[in-house]
Structure formats: C-alpha cells, structure tokens
Image (spheres, rainbow, N blue to C red):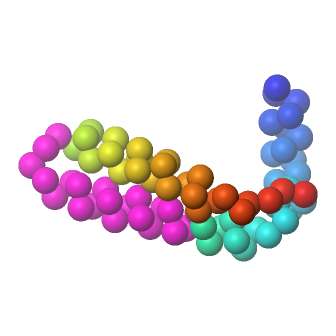
Amino acid sequence: MLQLGWYSAKLFFKGKLLRDPIYFIQQTAIASTIGSLLLVLFAQAEIPFCLPVTLSSLLTGMIMPFLLKDFKTK
C-alpha cells in the first residue's frame, strides 16, 4: 500500500500521473471556491464555528466526485 502511494507521489511530482493537469486544477479550484463560499455563508449564522466547517467540508466532499467524474490518469 505504501509502495503504491509512494509511486503515485513520484509520478505526480514528475508530471506523469495526470493526463490533463489543467482540467484537474480547474475542477479542484471550482470545488475549493464553492467550499469557501459555503464556509463564509454558514459562518454568518449564530452557531459554533465547528458546524460551518463541518458542513462546508461535507458538501465540498460530496461535490468532488461529480466534478472529477471524467478525470483520467496515465
């Protein structure tokens, strides 16, 4: 398991893991923006700060599979 992770990390840093790195960066940026906006909106409510962080993280994690459904590696 560790060998697979190490091999993937080496390929990623060499630039040989992703077929279309621009697409990956674009989709990740979209999800990060949505997550940040959700965090700011939820943080305006009069609730403890751990709840907005948890909700925005959960919703961002639910969005990622849909954004990266066409993601391909080499």
Q: Please identify the quarter of the rendering in which residue 34 is found.
A: bottom left
Q: Is residue 2 left or right of residue 50?
A: right
Query: How many badges with numbers are in the image?
Result: 0
Asked if one can make out residue 69 in the rendered structure from this viewpoint, the answer is yes
Whether 18 is drawn above or below 5: the answer is: below
**SS majority, magenta:** helix
Question: Is 69 contained in the magenta span?
Answer: no
Residue 13 appears in the rendering: no
The picture places residue 38, in percent across and down from the top left corner, at 32, 59
- Decide which of 67, 28 is in the foreground and name it: 67
Q: Is residue 22 left or right of residue 65?
A: right
Is residue 44 left or right of 22 when viewed as pictured? left
Q: Residue at image x 24%, y 61%?
A: 41
Q: Taking 41 as reference, is 49 above or below it? A: above
Q: Position of residue 61 (x, y in %)?
A: 49, 48
Would residue 41 be counted in the magenta stretch?
A: yes
Question: Front-most of 72 and 25?
Answer: 72
Task: Please give the name of the residue rendered at 88% of the width and 51% of the height, measured from the top-left corner.
Answer: 11
What residue occupies the far left of the structure in this picture? 46
**Percent position (x, y) of residue 13?**
82, 55
Identify the magenta region: 28-48
The residue at the point 26 percent across, 39 percent down is 50
Quadrant in the picture for residue 12: bottom right
- Residue 6 rendering spot, x and y as whole percentages: 84, 37
Quadrant in which the C terminus appears: bottom right
Identify the image quadrant of the N terminus. Answer: top right
Indicate the quadrant where residue 15 lies. Answer: bottom right
